[in-house]
Amino acid sequence: MNDIIDEAIASPSEASIANVLAFAGQDQLELFELAKRLKGDRIFVRAEILPSNYCRQNCLYCGNRRDNGAMKRYRITGRALSDVTDAALAIPEVDFVSYLMSEDPGYPFDQLCEEIRKVYAAGKRVNLGLGDVPAEVLRKLHDAAGGEPIKYTLKIESGDADHFRRVKDGYKLSARIDALRRAINAGFEPCSGIIVGLPGQDTCMIARDLMFLKDFPGLAQASASVFSPIRNTPFGAFPKGNESTAFNFLALLRILRNDRNLTTPISLYMSQEGRLAALEYFADTVTVEMMPAQRLPKFPFSIFDRAAGSYNRIPPQIRRRVDELSLELNNCRWHERY
Ligand code: SF4
């Protein structure tokens, strides 16, 4: 066993975790192999629906930020929302339907309750990521699942309070964590994660984020996306984050939590090579993009070709890798997992 990994497991601390986050080469492979043994062979498929990109927040790294006048805005509601849910439900392999959107207080959340009921009636589950919404809205959304498990994602992005406030234009980390706790109090399974490589972030901050997530009660999903500079944002000229650090973060988190109920999605922002490695070693959730980015500006007029709503929307390299690794699709077999 690798001494540095041993130390991070035996006494996880900012220093011992930071050492692992810097892994490359043989050390990294040993870390990955250990994570792989704990990950299991089951793969989840999530259909990702993005109902709105209006946002009241102004995060410096995000194209959806309030001040980005160059962003064409859309809201998918009514029949269009119902159609895209139906298309996701028509994909037999889909386990989760994820509704992920910006912080849009003007969104008609009652319509999402209808969609949630439909998803659960079809034997699938929902993961919501709607930002910081009021408790009464959360309760209604939770109740629409009829007592079945339902997830809520609120990434902390950066767990350092000063850094968080800087990259999120004054929004406070404590408010974010309160929002996550409100979702838990409403009955949701909490999901969270960070962005690796944000300007102003250092390895010690990432190590502390890992400790925060390691100890977060009931964490049902963890993710680490990699900062990617976006045009028309204040961080548009900064370099991309380090994918390898994000991988080490997720692999070590999986080892430290050692919890089969923790799912880890493959980020759509990873390199192709990175996605394949993630699938093999530490991630267990692949995504069917119901709304490819190039189609988003056309909303709500043309959502997508409904006939294309199939497992084949997952890139062929990923599907091939699932077969090569003999991974098994979960296919909504919930009782074997929970
Ligand atoms: S990161 Fe989320 S909350 Fe921040 S501007 Fe983007 S969509 Fe809004």
Image (cartoon, helix red, strand yellow):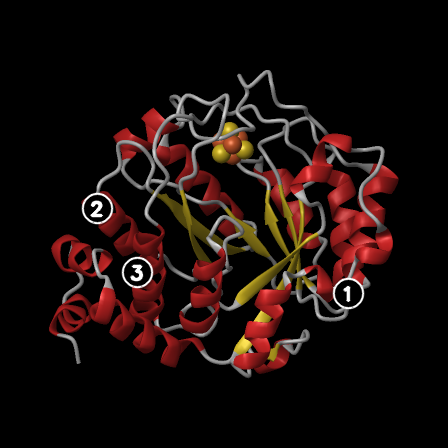
Percent x, y for residue 211?
A: 26, 55
Whether disc 1's CB lies below 8 Å from ligand 1 is answered: no
Percent x, y for residue 158?
A: 34, 40
Residue designated by label 3: 248
Any mark on residue 203, and which? 2
| Nearer-N-terminus badge (3/2) | 2
Residue designated by label 1: 91
Real-space CA distance between mark 2 and mark 1, rounded to the nearest whole angstrom: 40 Å
| Residue 311: quarter of image | bottom right
Which residue is more in the foreground, 319 or 208?
319
Q: Secondary structure at mark 1?
A: loop
| Nearer-N-terminus badge (1/3) | 1
Near mark 1 (Cα within 10 A), the count class, few <14, some 14-19 or many ≥20, is some
Task: Please state if 21 lies on the left or on the right of 219 as rendered.
Answer: left
Residue 21 can be seen in this image: yes
| Residue 327: quarter of image | bottom right
Real-space CA distance between mark 3 and mark 2, rounded to the nearest whole angstrom: 12 Å
Task: Please state if 160 lies on the left or on the right of 76 as rendered.
Answer: left
Percent x, y for residue 276?
A: 48, 66
Q: Residue at x 39, y 26 (%)?
A: 235
Residue 215 can be seen in this image: no
| Nearer-N-terminus badge (2/1) | 1
Percent x, y for residue 18?
A: 18, 54
Near mark 2 (Cα within 10 A), the count class, few <14, some 14-19 or many ≥20, is some
Near mark 3 (Cα within 10 A), the count class, few <14, some 14-19 or many ≥20, is many
